[in-house]
Image: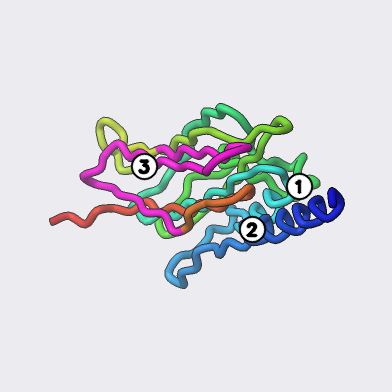
Amino acid sequence: MVKLLAFVLLIHIVVFSSLSYSATVFQDNSLSRRDTTIDPNKCIGFASNLPRSVTIVLINQSGYNITYSQVDFKDGRWITQADTGNTITCDPSTYPPLPNGQSETFSTANSRTAFGTEGTVFFGIGDQMAPPSTFSIYWLNPEIGVNNYIVTISNTSLYSYHNLDPGEGNNAVYQVIISAIPSA
């Protein structure tokens, strides 16, 4: 009986973990990925091999360059060349500014056994506003419980966001578009 229960549990884990990995990355023919951006499927693929991960696909429709500022990890770390066999890094601090109309992908993973990944990444929008327009993306993929995401924009009269993927499962993909609000 114990072996049967263990087998059923194993099947359940395999089926549901593969379902959580089957995220579809946003495709739009008018949106191009810059040459320096990692193919999102590579970051997603490496992240899916880890116990807990969040891959964020950031799509820039702000009208300006978006620049990485900093990260505040509560738990976790960026996926780096140590995870990928020196082939790629999924760390946005290594990327140049993200031009308007393009996207970039970055991934975080748990750094301790039996823990998830949680943090906030901060960006600036190159619109030359005073004070500068900024936004942040918070994620939480806990060991136990429901994933959570919060996008905070400093200038909500000029910019908005919407997400294309709910970012569920152990190896979540969260796609977010930062857009300019058309002037009246």
Image coords of residue 54 (percent x, y)? 59, 45
Sequence order check, earlier mark of 3 and 1: 1
Query: Quarter holding the C terminus?
Result: bottom left
| Residue range (magenta) | 136-164
* Residue 31 in which image quadrant: bottom left
Image coords of residue 165 (percent x, y)? 48, 57
User: Is-magenta flag for residue 145?
Assistant: yes
Q: Which residue is mark 2?
A: 21
Neighbour class for label 2 at 10 Å: few (<14), some, many (≥20)?
many
Give the amino acid type for the residue marked by disc 3 in the picture: Ile
Could you tell me which secondary element the residue under label 1 belongs to? helix
Q: Which residue is mark 3?
A: 125
Do the numbered discs 2 and 3 sit on residues whose CB atoms are within 8 Å? no
* Residue 104 as seen in the image, left or right of residue 99: right
Q: Which residue is mark 1?
A: 84
* Residue 117 in which image quadrant: top right
| Vertical arrangement, residue 26 with respect to residue 6, above or below | below
Whole-angstrom CA distance, mark 3 to mark 1, is 30 Å
Sequence order check, earlier mark of 2 and 3: 2
Looking at the rendered image, the disc whose residue lies closer to the viewer, 2 or 1, is: 2
Which residue shows up at 36% across the image and 42% down it? 125
Looking at the rendered image, the disc whose residue lies closer to the viewer, 3 or 1, is: 1
Which residue shows up at 48% across the image and 51% down it? 58
Image coords of residue 95 (percent x, y)? 56, 44
